[in-house]
Amino acid sequence: MIRDITLGQYFPAGSIIHSLDARTKILGTLLFVIELFVVDSFFGFAVLATFLAAIIAASKVPVKFIFRGLTPVFAIILFTFVINLFMSPGRVLWHWWFLTITVEGVRRAFFMAVRLVLLIIGSSMLTLCTKPIQLTDGLEKLLKPFKAIGVPSHEIALMMTIALRFIPTLMEEADKIIKAQQARGADFESGNIFRRGKALIPILIPLFVSSFRIAQELALAMEARCYNGGGGRTRMNEIHFARRDALAGVLMAASLGAAIAIRIL
Amino acid sequence: MAIEVKDLQYTYSPGLPGETKALDGVSFNIDDGSICGIIGHTGSGKSTLLQALDGLIKPSDGEIIIDGISLTDKETSLVDVRKRVGIVFQYPEYQLFEETVAKDVSFGPSNLGLEGDELEAAVRSSIELVGLDYERIKDKSPFELSGGQKRRVAIAGVIAMNPGILILDEPTAGLDPTAHKEILSMVKRIHETRNIIIVFVSHNMGDVADMCDKVLVMNEGRIILDGTPRYVFGQKDVLDEIGLGVTPAAEIVGRIRERIPEIDSDVLSMEEAAASLAEFIKRKRS
Ligand SMILES: Nc1ncnc2c1ncn2[C@@H]1O[C@H](COP(=O)(O)OP(=O)(O)OP(=O)(O)O)[C@@H](O)[C@H]1O
Ligand SMILES: [Mg+2]
């Protein structure tokens, strides 16, 4: 069901990973993504996957929960897999009519699929283990140095939090609308791609209208609580780097070193 | 047409942290042509039950039989269910999507295969049944109507499918007192002209007592009371325990009885309360 999508959701588990400073986790995620692109062999992926598995184990987030949230993006992964499989030039492995699979295609398809899966799981660990409010604070602090060159750090951070916060709300809304249109006999499962595309209209229009309504209500609610931008705002809980953040930093640097070493050697 | 529900079970996100048992052994029957009200605290499983009655969610256990066909049977086609059961969700006005009212109302019946004159007749009669002027409203955009009008259009979109059972989830939520009364009299009118089963959820005990032949009281996924309004609202202790009240009239009479215990306590509506007070005064005078 659409409500089971956990993209961008927070999972309270109270682990060591949860208690790290948000900035550490944001930078760590960024590093992990960079490492995924530094590495260019399956061996490298295996090392990074082990690293990620260790983080997941330490975070106490159930693996089932992580994977359940991934089901909707599997369509994208499958799509890139198929495109890579059939579209890569090279030594022909199999050929039928207009379809050709090459040795390079197989390698590339698996390579990209593994990279995407690691990328998605890795970045979803950030939101699973960090409260949205901490994420905003962390992001805002990280962006602060760029304020001098005109980057609206507070606004960017706020926009991101709101976007994350609204994923589950919109899912819920979509779930309601889908059920209501199904009850009126709408059929989303049969017919060719055009019919199916057309069948989405009764969902997308109400969803669009609802998101405007929700956004307006949120704006009103914020104004009612005297929100007027980030200037001069203070925090009840300031975020601080701790010993464990230093330790995490060392581990992160080590993993980056390992990734570069694997690439060069 | 009748509804038979046996030992229904349903759990949201089983095996995950948000696991909630929303239905826990729900059984009841609703006879042909009756109006049934469902009351219960927020989160007691009412909306979940209604969705199961239209085959929108698959119960993990139990059986639902509507008009002789079993919803829980894998062989049953959902189109057969949709022809029999129409469901109007809470705030149905958020589901409107077409350019014109007439097109929106015809979405349901055309999905069931209605075409041409037959379709137009169905759309016209249901728009009129919800108390709107067909000629004046049919070419308007649903987005430019008032809240109450939108809700009527959304309800018309469901009754245009000519269901034998009409299910409404809090049809009066968020309406002002006038619109509230109008929606209720509309529901009564639909019941009388089409002679169909009506099942509706309400938080207003007075409405439920006035309209229904049968009341189901839900608490934590179970049905704890099932009977006529007179029986159900007679169980003041049970209702109090789960935080539900009785009807306003019964409440008033209850308060008066604290001072004057001789007054007849078996009242549901304001008329009955007035009659019982008048009778008491007459008795006192003679
Ligand atoms: N899509 C969902 N995912 C997970 N849990 C849900 C979902 N929908 C409802 N629940 C839970 O199931 C239980 C029953 O919910 P339901 O919506 O049936 O209650 P209700 O009686 O209709 O309440 P209300 O009067 O507030 O409308 C609640 O505890 C609710 O939190
Ligand atoms: Mg409900």
Image (cartoon, coloured by chain):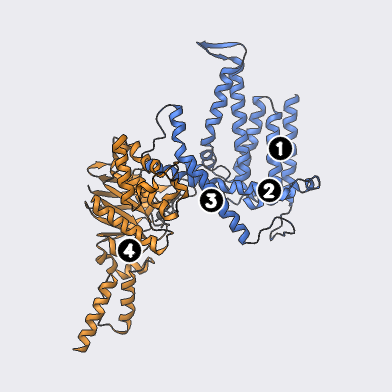
Q: Foreground mark, 4 or 1?
A: 4
- In the picture, the disc for residue A31 is 1
- In the picture, the disc for residue A213 is 3
Which of pointers 3 and 1 lies earlier in the amino acid sequence? 1
- What element does badge 1 sit on? helix
Chain containing the residue with disc 4:
B
- In the picture, the disc for residue B68 is none
Q: Residue furthest front?
A: B136
Mark 2 sits on what residue?
A157
Report x, y in % for residue B37: 31, 58
Q: Could you tell me which residue is drawn at 69 percent across and 52 percent down?
A: A137
Gap in Å between the C-alphas at discs 3 and 2? 22 Å
Chain containing the residue with disc 1:
A
- What element does badge 2 sit on? helix
Mark 4 sits on what residue?
B207
Which of pointers 1 and 2 lies earlier in the amino acid sequence? 1
In the image, residue B85 above or below residue B233: above
Write down which chain is painted orange: B
Tag 4: residue type? Asp
For the C terminus of chain B, which image quadrant? bottom left
